[in-house]
Image: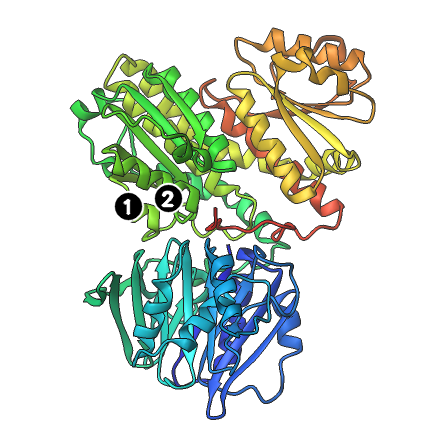
């Protein structure tokens, strides 16, 4: 969940590293630091706070054409200057930056202390610097491999050593690392965002792989029990616009990404809708019609918002394909010794494609012989490389921690999958064409919802004044409510809980009061009367109500007494995503009214690469 950058070449490293760290700040921002290797050895500057604070306090003489940098999301020890990366050995000859968690750090720290090493920090990472420094191997690669052989856990690391001033050594196991190839210079990063301004030719390391990076190129190695063996990793050109990583005139990336949703929705649908036969065309699944028809169950795995959109997808698949489907938190999946069935289609959902809990779930499924596809947004990511097939989301880079456009495209991918599964079963061509027409209408309808942003901002400011909120919905509306509560809590820091509307009377109704607003999801569907009845129960107890609904819904004598947000009506199976969009806008403007840093919510990071 932290950010790594590295540079080696003919330019001064520090300015390039600071620029890269700024672009990775969404991955961790408790503290930041740099280590540069120059003629006088390794110099380190690090401190708690944001990257801009590090840059403002950087010494004037901080020269060197080799360097590594880091933004930290604290795991071991609080966010302070000492615990910030890079970490060094006692002599200051080795510098290490690290993403991930070393599970046996306590034992290694105790061993080092027993050998007379004075550990300066609370971190797990510091042990790596000491282990590398104490190795007697002849090369930096061998010293690093020897140190890593002692480590249990996950890592993405970059290492510099004063005795080897022509190289950076990097290694990966469960935490992403890429190498960017320039003109007589090389870049290292944990995310493409850090290097895309300088090069779009990159190599992704696999787990268990190490690389030697010099100004002239790179070599890769496989770390195994016998030591190091050469691999043939090649760099590839990635199709990405560097400007996609800039917020432009927008006050935040989240605002920019919300407004991009109509265009990105069109991108994920383009070329994948078959109007003639009323079906989806998802060639990346690597499953033909007979294999799709043989699927007896669908299991969806994701974390956070990906989990909630997975619940929306499971509901769609059951409704359209009449196959049992459910979603589960990927973080729990492998720990309950799951039964992996040969006729189950497993779907892993992750914007970054690097979410460690989801990646480990994929690996558990594959160890047990299951077939798994991925819904990911990053080409070349770990999950994209591991799965048996997939649906690329085409959402474009998503920088804000709170997911908007990627979540919307996840839903649309599930809708296409549900239609395709349904059409090889009992979904009629008429219903297929009805749903394809509905999908084609969604980008324009999202645009209509976003056009109401000024009115939604007024409602959001009122909701932000509450310390606690309820979000409620039934069946299709419940995962919408869960996602709405997620957005509200993660960027406004208000306590927000989601419940099934039908469950209110079984306990949560006791908490309803004039101080606890409820945001109710009330689509114009077969449950509208039951939902409206529940609104009366809340109103009777003085609970303020905001109702996200459709224009045709009659709220009876509640009309004029509640905040009403109407969204365009689509096919009832596809309505959930349109009901989700205003909840994004509400959360955004609630956080804005409270003065929060919307793109960097406290305690959170964009790509979760630690368990």
- Who is closer to the viewer here, 510 or 575? 510
Residue nearer the viewer, 132 or 521: 132
Instruction: Judge from the rendering whether residue 433 lies leftward or rightward of residue 445; answer left or right.
Output: left
Image height of 604 relative to 529, above or below: below
The residue shown at (82%, 27%) is 515
Q: Residue at x 43, y 32 (%)?
A: 411
Q: Is residue 587 above or below residue 537?
A: below
Q: Which residue is mark 2?
A: 359
Q: Are marks 1 and 2 in contact (CB under 8 Å)?
A: yes
**Viewer-proximal residue, 121 or 277?**
121
Side (left or right) of 507 relative to 356: right
- Mark 1: which secondary structure? helix
Task: Determine the image quadrant of residue 150.
Answer: bottom left
According to the picture, the residue beneath numbered tag 1 turns out to be: 386
Task: Locate residue 372, reporting x and y percent.
Answer: 29, 35
| Residue 161 x %, y % | 42, 81
Residue at figure coordinates x 75%, y 45% from the top left: 593
């Amino acid at each position: 969940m932290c950010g790594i950058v590295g540079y080696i070449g003919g330019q001064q490293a520090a300015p390039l590293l600071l620029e890269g760290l700024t672009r990775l700040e969404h991955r961790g921002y408790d503290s930041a630091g740099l280590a540069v290797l120059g003629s006088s050895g390794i110099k380190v500057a690090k401190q708690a706070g944001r990257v801009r604070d590090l840059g403002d306090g950087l010494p004037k003489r901080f020269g060197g054409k080799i360097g590594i940098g880091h933004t930290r999301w604290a795991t071991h020890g609080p966010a302070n200057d000492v615990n910030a990366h890079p970490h060094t050995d006692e002599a200051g000859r080795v510098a290490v930056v690290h993403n991930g968690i070393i599970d046996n750090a306590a034992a290694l720290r105790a061993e080092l202390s027993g050998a007379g090493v004075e550990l300066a920090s609370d971190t797990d990472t510091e042990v790596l610097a000491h282990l590398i420094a104490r190795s007697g191997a002849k090369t930096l690669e061998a010293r690093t491999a020897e140190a890593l052989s002692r480590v249990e856990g996950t890592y993405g690391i970059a290492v510099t050593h004063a005795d080897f001033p022509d190289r950076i050594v990097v290694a990966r196991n469960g935490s992403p690392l890429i190498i960017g190839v320039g003109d007589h210079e090389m870049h290292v990063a944990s995310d493409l965002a850090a290097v895309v301004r300088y090069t779009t030719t990159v190599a992704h390391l696999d787990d268990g792989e190490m690389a030697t990076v010099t100004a002239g190129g790179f070599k890769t190695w496989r770390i195994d029990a016998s030591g190091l063996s050469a691999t043939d990793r090649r760099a590839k050109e990635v199709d990405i616009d560097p400007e996609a990583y800039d917020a432009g005139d927008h006050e935040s990336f989240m605002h920019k990404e919300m407004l991009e949703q109509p265009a990105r929705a069109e991108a994920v649908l383009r070329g994948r809708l078959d109007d003639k036969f009323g079906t989806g065309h998802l060639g990346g699944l690597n499953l033909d019609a007979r294999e799709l028809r043989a699927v007896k169950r669908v299991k969806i795995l994701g974390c956070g918002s990906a989990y909630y959109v997975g619940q929306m997808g499971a509901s769609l698949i059951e409704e359209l394909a009449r196959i049992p489907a459910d979603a589960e938190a990927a973080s729990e999946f492998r720990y309950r010794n799951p039964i992996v069935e040969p006729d189950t289609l497993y779907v892993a959902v992750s914007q970054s494609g690097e979410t460690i809990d989801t990646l480990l779930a994929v690996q558990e499924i594959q160890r047990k012989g299951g077939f798994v596809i991925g819904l990911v947004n990053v080409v070349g990511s770990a999950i994209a490389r591991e799965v048996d097939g997939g649906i690329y989301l085409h959402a474009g880079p998503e920088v804000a921690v709170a997911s908007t456009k990627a979540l919307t495209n996840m839903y649309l991918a599930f809708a296409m999958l549900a239609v395709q599964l349904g059409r090889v079963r009992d979904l009629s061509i008429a219903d297929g064409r009805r749903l394809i027409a509905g999908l084609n209408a969604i980008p324009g309808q999202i645009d209509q919802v976003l056009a109401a942003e000024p009115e939604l901002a007024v409602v959001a400011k009122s909701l932000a004044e509450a310390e606690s909120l309820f979000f409620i919905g039934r069946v299709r509306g419940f995962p919408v409510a869960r996602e709405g509560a997620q957005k509200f809590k993660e960027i406004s820091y208000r306590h927000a809980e989601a419940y099934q509307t039908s469950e209110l009377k079984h306990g949560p109704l006791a908490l309803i009061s004039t101080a606890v607003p409820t945001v109710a999801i009330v689509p114009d569907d077969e449950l509208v009367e039951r939902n409206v009845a529940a609104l009366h129960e809340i109103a009777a107890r003085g609970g303020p109500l905001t109702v996200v609904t459709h224009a045709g819904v009659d709220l009876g004598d509640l009309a004029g007494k509640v905040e009403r947000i109407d969204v365009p009506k689509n096919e009832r199976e596809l309505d959930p995503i349109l009901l989700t969009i205003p909840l994004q806008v509400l959360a955004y403007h609630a956080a804005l009214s409270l003065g929060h840093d919307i793109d960097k919510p406290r305690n959170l990071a964009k790509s979760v690469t630690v368990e």
